[in-house]
Image: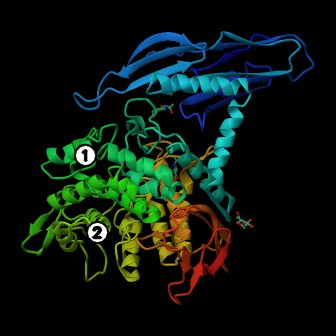
Amino acid sequence: AGDPLLEVKSLFACVGSSTRSHLSSPHSLFIYAHHSLVHLMAFSITIWRSAHTTQPITVQLQTPFVPKSQDLDLNQGPDFQGAQYVYGKTLVPEVEGGPRPTVHMLWTPVPQTLTLRGEERERSWEFLMAVAESEEEAKRSYREGLALMAAGSLHSSHVHAWAMLWRGCCIDLDGPLPLRQALYGCLYYLLSAIPPRGNPGFLFHGISPGGLSNGTQGEDYWGHVFWDQDTWMFPNILLFYPEAARAILEYRIRTLEGALRNAQEQGYKGAKFPWESAATGREVCPEEIYGAQEIHVTGDVLMAFEQYYCTTQDQKLFREDGGWKLVDAVAQYWCSRMVWSEEEQCYHIKGVMPPDEYHYQVDNSVYTNAVAQRSLNFAADIARDFLIPVPEEWVDCAKKIKVPFDAEKKYHPEYDGYSPGEPVKQADVVLLGFPLMYPMSSEVRRNDLEMYEPITELDGPAMSWSMFAVGWLELKEVQRAQSQLNKCFSNITEPFKIWVENSDGSGAVNFLTGMGGFLQAVLFGYTGFRITRSSLRFNPALPNDINKLNVTGVSYFGNKLKFTIAKEEIRIKVIESHQDPLAPPLEAVLEESGQRFPLREGMVSSPGSAS
Ligand SMILES: *[C@@H]1O[C@H](CO)[C@@H](O)[C@H](O)[C@H]1NC(C)=O
Ligand SMILES: *[C@@H]1O[C@H](CO)[C@@H](O)[C@H](O)[C@H]1NC(C)=O
Ligand SMILES: *[C@@H]1O[C@H](CO)[C@@H](O)[C@H](O)[C@H]1NC(C)=O
């Protein structure tokens, strides 16, 4: 077998194709983050003989990995069950005097050689790495990994865990293959990033636009969390996995202290979520302007709480687990952020940067003001549900906040003084229709789409087009929707369907925000799902090249539903029910006729069609 050299680039890096040629025997390499043992990475090498030879085959391994880091103060600990062990703290706290998180890491040492003996035809070697915040957790994970390895089921248990997760949610359609593949790819990557199920006590730290940061200075936004999580990714997760959605909200609750400080530092009351969030909720954006001005994020966070409340009725999150305190603090923030205009007799929010980051220091960003209004309405609603007196101020500010509207042209200007045709970086005003569901006629909805679609930057971030698609689907302009949706495809990178943030390849990779928008275009666009206080509305519209859409595992009030949408028929099946017996029975209602279809476990109802 010559003298093959197998270079394991870092402890768990895959071997590049250039080194592959050194191996004269067939081999395979696996690397995966174990899906049920969430602190574990696994790596395996398999070597097998292709020819009828009997001499031993020896493979040399090299690893440049050294347990050193410029960010961590690492110490070596005693070996543990054959694993090497280091632990330490981050060198620099996120904020002065703040906590310095710890990390504990165990890994299987990499031998210098692996030998397939003369009598062996094939053999695999498995390597583990456990990383956790506590020594106990890291060691427990490593031990469990070893036990699975000994039982020969390390990889199969990973595959099984994925299969279980996948069973609970599926989007499948009878339509173009690239679209189906893109959907599967997006779901896979998004589900890879959500809080693990069945891991009580696991502290979730939010989802960054590129998932985990790639480690290089500033790459993938350092792994920071933006509105991308709450507005773009969250609704998809909520629809299938409310427990995971809850863990995302708990992350925001855990960082409320930081948000309170942010507001105070800027001279306001209540809580202001940071533009870029990490462990503490203090602003960690490297450029001041975003933290100071792109304040819509605070309303975006609250909208995720609202959607969660409307689909789960989980009052415990609000009453016992800190949710109400957050809602209350956000409402206070918005009230203190508004100023009364004597001239216009309404409240203004001045000096902001809208989602369209080409503009800053503008007054009355229509999206920002509408999301603030929505926060206040939700805060008041939930207070009423909990029999808490609603502060007069909340009602007043919600009622009297300015939401810019051009009565002559019948469209929403992006901010005070916006002139039509001014280029826009990304989806902004179009978000009023969805996800905000700001009330407007279909004429105005259409005008907003027509106004902003041609001037939205083609090179802007990948999620914009999905929201135009949702808008056109709402208006039943299915082909216009499809041409917007197709723009999402041009930048999916083969063979692993990786998304880039911007069409020039810059920005975060693998861009979960874009995937989140794309999934919403299907999950909320084709189906017409809208989460409201009283119901989960649906109003499907399928483009010509899609005959059928199945959405399995939609979670609503403790039920799991399957929607089968075809041009001639819609079917709804209750596949699982853990509904509160005191809650009103589930039914599908046709709005126009008022006809009601009861939904019970195992039953299929067929209340209409998608034409
Ligand atoms: C959708 O579900 C139906 C009924 O379960 C099934 O017959 C059909 O093959 C599915 N279609 C797609 C595209 O997955
Ligand atoms: C991290 O980002 C840098 C700069 O874009 C890139 O060169 C590098 O390949 C990335 N690393 C990984 C592991 O993706
Ligand atoms: C993204 O797609 C556009 C339009 O097809 C193309 O011009 C551009 O080169 C693509 N960018 C990347 C990074 O693939």
Amino acid, disc 1: Ala
In the rendered image, residue 471, in percent from the top left (x then y), is placed at: 45, 71
Residue 86 vs 529, above or below: the answer is: above
State the residue at coordinates (37%, 82%): 441
Which quadrant is home to the C terminus? bottom right
Which quadrant is home to the N terminus? top right
Residue 524 image label: none
Answer few, some or many: residues within 10 Å of disc 2's Cα (few below 14, many 20 plus, some between 14 and 19). Answer: few
In the rendered image, residue 76, in percent from the top left (x then y), is placed at: 46, 11
Answer few, some or many: residues within 10 Å of disc 1's Cα (few below 14, many 20 plus, some between 14 and 19). Answer: many
Cβ at disc 2 under 8 Å from ligand 1: no
Residue 384 image label: 2
- Is residue 291 rendered to the left or right of residue 107? left
Residue 371 vs 37, above or below: the answer is: below
In the rendered image, residue 610, in percent from the top left (x then y), is placed at: 60, 78
State the residue at coordinates (48%, 62%): 466
Cβ at disc 1 under 8 Å from ligand 2: no
Q: Residue furthest front?
A: 582
| Along the viewing direction, whichever of 112 and 313 lies nearer the viewer | 313
Residue that numbered label 1 is attached to: 259
Give the Cα distance between marks 2 and 1: 25 Å
- Is residue 207 rendered to the left or right of residue 551? left
Amino acid, disc 2: Arg
| Along the viewing direction, whichever of 587 and 154 lies nearer the viewer | 587
In the rendered image, residue 110, in percent from the top left (x then y), is placed at: 62, 14
Element class at badge 2: helix
Residue 287 appears anywhere in the view: yes
Q: Quadrant of the rendered structure where residue 201 is?
A: top left
Residue 71 appears anywhere in the view: no
- Is residue 50 rendered to the left or right of residue 147? right
Element class at badge 1: helix
Mark 2 and 1 residues: CB-CB less than 8 Å, in contact? Answer: no
